[in-house]
Image (cartoon, grey):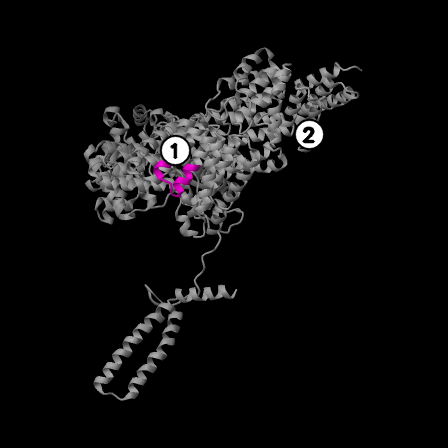
Amino acid sequence: MAGSGAKLFWSELKRRKVVRVAVGYGVLAWVVLQFGDTVLSLLNLPEWVGRALVAVVIIGLPVALVLAWMFDISPEGLVTDAGQAPATPIDFTFSEPGPVDAADLELVRPRLTALIGRRDECAVLRQRLDEAVAGRGGVVLIGGEPGVGKTRLGEEALEMGRDLGMLPFVGHAYEEHGAPFIIASEILEEVSRTLPTDALRNVLGDTAPEIARLLPDLRRRFPAIPAPMELPPEQQQRYLFNAMLEFTTRLTRCGPVIMLLDDLHWADESSTLLLEHLMPHLPRLPLLMVVTYRDVAADMDEPFRRALSKLGRLPFVTRIPLRDLSRADVTELLTSLGGTAPPAEIVEVIFDETEGNAFFVQSVYQHLAEEGRLFDDNGHWLTDIDADTLAVPDSVRLVIDRRLERMSETTRACLNLSAIMGLRFDPKILEVASGKSQDEVIESIEQAEAANLILPTVGQRENRYEFTHALVRQALLEALSPLRRDRLHLTVAEAMEQIFGERSDQAADIARHLYLSGDAADAEKTVHYLMLATDRAVEAAASNEAVEHLEKALTLVPAESELERAAMLLRCGLLRSSAEVARADRELRSALDVFRKHKRSEEIAQIIVRLCFHFTYEGHVEEGLALCKEGLTVVGQDASRARCSILSALGLAYALAADVTNSTRWHDEAQEMAETLESPELLAEVLANRAISYWQSLNASEMIRAGGRAVELNRSGYRAWELKSSLAYYVLGLTLMGRFDEGWPVVNETLELSIRDGDSQSQMMCGLTLGMHHAAAGDLQSAIENAKHSVEINDVQGLPWGGHFYGVLADFQMRAGEWDSALATYAKSQATVVSGTCWDHGDLSYSLLGMAVIEPSRFDAIWERLRHVIPEMTVDLPAGRIQALLAAVESLAIMGRMGDAAHLYPRVREIADRGLFVQQFHTGLVEKTAGIGATAACELEAAETHFKTALTLADELPYVTEQGEVRRWYAQMLLTRSAPGDKAHARRLLTEAVTVYTRCGMPRHREMAEKMLAGLPA
């Protein structure tokens, strides 16, 4: 307590500048005394004058320090110090969000024009709003052609929501694609501006670190927001998406919410993916999303077109297709615009020419009114008018052109610059870019607004404007020559640079304008801003947008700048999603060639480790081994992070190549080096890879040891993003050891983390591990569902392990008595086998057992493919051969080929002695298989020992499905032995097995046991 008090007092002395004043006073006092001594000597002044000077200097010190404590110098002059500065909070504290009364908030309600002819649509909106207020949220998709009134109907939905006490927020998509997640960022900005500070803090909650990625200003408002978790790009985006879902959920606890997402046909990839992630959760939230979009295919960007086909099928999504106004609606609209009902002739002409397009009608009205062709001098509608007199332009584009011609030269120049900026623009940028005075810019904006060409942006700050329609902007842009557009883009970029500098949130827009300036812009500057935009996109977890910026930068960097290009290719390769593995590999290989040439060891190591993982997971083991060996040559023999990572990757590659000896050797060296370098982060990486390698030989105890240490390091913050991967292999080790009680909470945590972070491979592993847990618990239907999920992930990812995953699924289906489904699944398993890895032949082991049980006539075809690879020795066996060996013993016994099964028994006994309790993904205990082998070898006493051990394990673990299987096979051994009391014992075991099979839903196995019972004498 005393230490912290002293520290606080010292920091307060420094804050109040007391320390600085004391030091400065000391220096000044020394100068004064030296000067005084010299002057006194020259003037021969009395000695008391010198003593008085010293006294004044000494007395002045405490006075100066007191004044420094009490007062401060500020831009306003000398002011009293306010006391101790408020300390920055150590933690970002928050509580659960509570209700916020929308009536108490300063919500901007824009001036809206009358809504004409949309009564049915408004009724649908009102129904969906009422449902949202009641807690049943959803989506309304408002689609239509340009100018039909989509945004206006969306604005009406906002007004209706406000009247119901809902919190209204607006986000826009932009044709020009600037900063990532712009729609979400605009909504977050509105939330931040609208909610009181305490309410905002509570809504943010523990999502604040991720939300601050999209809205960096939050960190200035709440300095104590923690740093976000570091994750690989694809997982980082998924983590952000989950944070946005949690944020949205917490926001709705303040009250029901309506969001208008405008012009979503222009939505970027990241925004569309976020929308797809949020939408399935809306039915349980008091939130209505109103989406406007052009339903013309040519106007839709690919991301939204792809998403629309999915969203339209969801039951809580309502489509409102907007059609043109009817003749009566046009009459009503013209009445609203003109103040009185128009003559039928005018309605007829305007309706025929515009076909009821709302924007075209208003534009024609504005144009004709400005030309004096609609009203007389008294403001009354003109009569006796025909089509020739009105001379309505043939298209809305011509109408806009005519109206633009009436703008002043200054206004037209400002509108041109505004069109270059985008559909929405900032007058502050316009003022700097135009070089006009503030008054001139304001006058131009007022003239354009009066002409209904622009208007204040809905839901944005009051100093933002937008064109009344994209067609107005399009007309302005098409009137500019390509050279003029280039120059104006450069002008806007320079204005933004002058205003914002290198602010990350503006980098993407500046980069876009510079890039569109073409040769007019300096290429180096353009690349610089593209790289800033890349960094910002990475910070915002928008890896797709980051790659787009890098690809543009690559077009501007000359070929001779090969290191710069290689660095960009490296970033592209690392940022690409799992759906673009082939392209990422090409980029990484191209970068690797350059880094080899320049002997850049760190970059070489980074690429080699990444490529090695790609190759090993895709089954291209030899390529992975070759790359790692080359990498070791490049990085040299000295201990380094680069060498350690490559050694670890090499150990993993050797494990997958079924070379346990070399795998152990390189892992040992990597682990020793990580410990020598005293790097917990490296050690976490090495141990995680080591756990995976032990899995390749089914060394369960070492999987637990290495995986457990990796988990501890991950939980301590070292490579924290790999926690779910480390957990996945750790819990698989527990499962293979039969430690199901310990495994349940771990596998559930792993699955939760994997879903949260979007780690599909960990989810895939969890599906199989959960399947084993459910099978052990006697719930085969849940086991089947989890296995199906793993199969789906494998297929979507395009991984080569379908033989195993389909095999696991078929095994569960076979045991559940779904034999037709199992046969079809076994066929898929056999069609997707992989070779050249430690898992060779394991995929066929499922079909071997399945055919023995279901389709004995097809057994020999599988057995012929396996019989020559069943090992003679079991030391350091790879996983695939262990699986094949264990499956072969049971399968051969079922087929009655006891001699072949007996030949394999010694090898099975070795595996049982190693401590492997549970077969890899098969529903089976190794001790049971050993008992079957011993029975085949006529070593019946040993068989009974194995079966008793298996029975104890099945009952104690518990392993429910095996409780029936062990009893059935044990009974078979007893009937073979036929010692006194064996038949009675067998009857008891078979009766118990029937009960277990019935409880577990294993009807075919129950029939097997019942058939055996029926064959016993009464």
Q: Which residue is mark 2?
A: 949
- Res 113 seen here: no
Residue in the picture at 20% in, 42% down: 410
Q: Main secondary structure of the magenta part?
A: helix
Q: Nearer the viewer, residue 523 or 906?
A: 906
User: On the rendered structure, is 842 left or right of 446?
Assistant: right
The numbered disc on residue 629 is 1
Q: Nearer the viewer, residue 142 or 899?
A: 899
Residue 591 picture location, percent across and down: 32, 34
Q: How many marks?
A: 2
Q: Quadrant of the C terminus?
A: top right
* Circle nearer the N terminus (2, 1): 1
Q: Residues within 10 Å of mark 1 (few under 14, many from 20)?
A: some
Query: Which quadrant holds residue 121?
Result: top left
Residue in the picture at 31% in, 23% down: 352
Circle 2 or circle 1, nearest the eye? 1
Q: Nearer the viewer, residue 832 or 201?
A: 832
Residue 693 picture location, percent across and down: 50, 33
Q: Is residue 133 above or below residue 784?
A: below
Residue 940 picture location, percent across and down: 70, 22
SS type, badge 2 = helix
Q: Nearer the viewer, residue 22 or 457?
A: 22
Label 1 sits on what residue type? Lys
SS type, badge 1 = helix
Which range of residues does the magenta coloring cover? 631-647
Q: Residues within 10 Å of mark 2 (few under 14, many from 20)?
A: some
Whether residues under marks 2 and 1 lie with C-beta atoms below 8 angstroms apart, the answer is no
- Res 352 seen here: yes
User: On the rendered structure, is 570 left or right of 518?
Assistant: right
The numbered disc on residue 677 is none
Query: What distance separates the C-alpha of mark 2 from that of mark 1?
Result: 46 Å
Label 2 sits on what residue type? Thr
